[in-house]
């Protein structure tokens, strides 16, 4: 029996199907798999960072703070998280709303809490003692147009300035206030931004209104 020395082996690839020594017929599937892998690893973060927010707040819109409570967001700011009153109802005890504009963010967090606004802010600060925080400033009180009384705490540091305001979402009897949901309004901005946006921040805080049943 003789062996034909010119017969190609089973794994032999013709020259016209080779690119840089590789079988060009297998390159498209391999490149597709590589692109998908890169997108899964890096792509979504890059895409999310590249797409600007388009949920811009317009005149007349209200933030839904749950159980009928509302706040008036600044026109032109972006609603990055949360719901407007025109959307699905929001729970006052699992509220997470974030608006941003002018180098400043205002976050609204609602939880169930029995006690006063001062006690609620104390608990928030105790929970964050193990985390890096800005240097705390003085405490004060804020009364909204609807009569809600909040306890405020300023803070500052190299990375920026902050303001935390704790509310109990009721203007009723002391028992009703203690039993009402708690709302933490957290304002953060680069150095100087809070002072620059002071009127806007004050207007947002002043607009916070509890539900009709509160």
Image (spheres, rainbow, N blue to C red):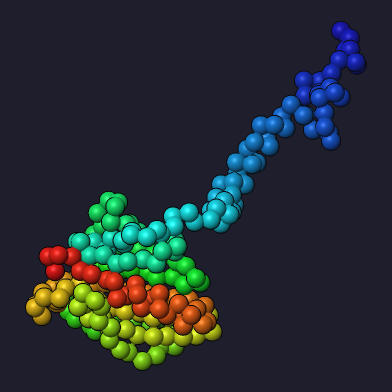
Numbered label tally: 0
Residue 164: name its quadrant.
Answer: bottom left
| 68 sits to left or right of 109 | left
The one of 199 and 21 positioned closer to us in this rendering: 199
Figure quadrant of the C terminus: bottom left
Residue 117: where, in percent of width, then height? 23, 80
Left or right: residue 127 compared with residue 80: left
Q: Residue pushed farthest right?
A: 5
Looking at the rendered image, the quarter that the N terminus falls into is top right
Q: Is residue 150 visible?
A: yes
Identify the residue shown where x is 65% and y is 41%. 34
Among all residues in the image, which is located at the extreme front?
A: 59
Residue at left 32%, top 66%?
72
Can you say whether 158 is above or below 18 in the image? Answer: below
Whether 1 is drawn above or below 180: the answer is: above
**Residue that lies at the very extreme toward the top in this rendered image:** 1
- Position in image of residue 186 (x %, y %): 37, 74
Find residue 17 and report its image quarter. Answer: top right
């Amino acid at each position: 029996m003789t062996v034909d020395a010119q017969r190609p082996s089973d794994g032999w690839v013709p020259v016209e199907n080779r690119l840089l020594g590789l079988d060009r017929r297998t390159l498209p599937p391999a490149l597709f798999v590589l692109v998908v892998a890169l997108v899964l690893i890096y792509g979504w973060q890059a895409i999310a960072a590249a797409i600007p927010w388009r949920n811009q707040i317009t005149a007349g819109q209200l933030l839904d703070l749950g159980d009928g409570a509302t706040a008036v967001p600044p026109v032109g700011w972006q609603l990055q998280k949360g719901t407007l009153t025109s959307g699905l109802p929001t729970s006052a005890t699992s509220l997470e709303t974030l608006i941003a504009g002018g180098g400043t963010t205002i976050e609204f967090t609602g939880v169930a809490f029995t006690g006063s606004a001062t006690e609620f802010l104390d608990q928030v600060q105790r929970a964050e003692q193990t985390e890096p925080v800005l240097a705390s400033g003085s405490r004060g009180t804020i009364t909204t147009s609807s009569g809600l009384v909040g306890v405020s705490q300023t803070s500052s540091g190299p990375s920026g300035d902050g303001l935390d305001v704790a509310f109990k979402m009721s203007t009723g009897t002391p028992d009703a206030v203690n039993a009402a949901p708690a709302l933490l309004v957290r304002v953060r901005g680069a150095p100087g931004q809070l002072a620059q946006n002071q009127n806007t921040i004050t207007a947002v805080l002043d607009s916070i209104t509890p539900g009709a049943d509160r």
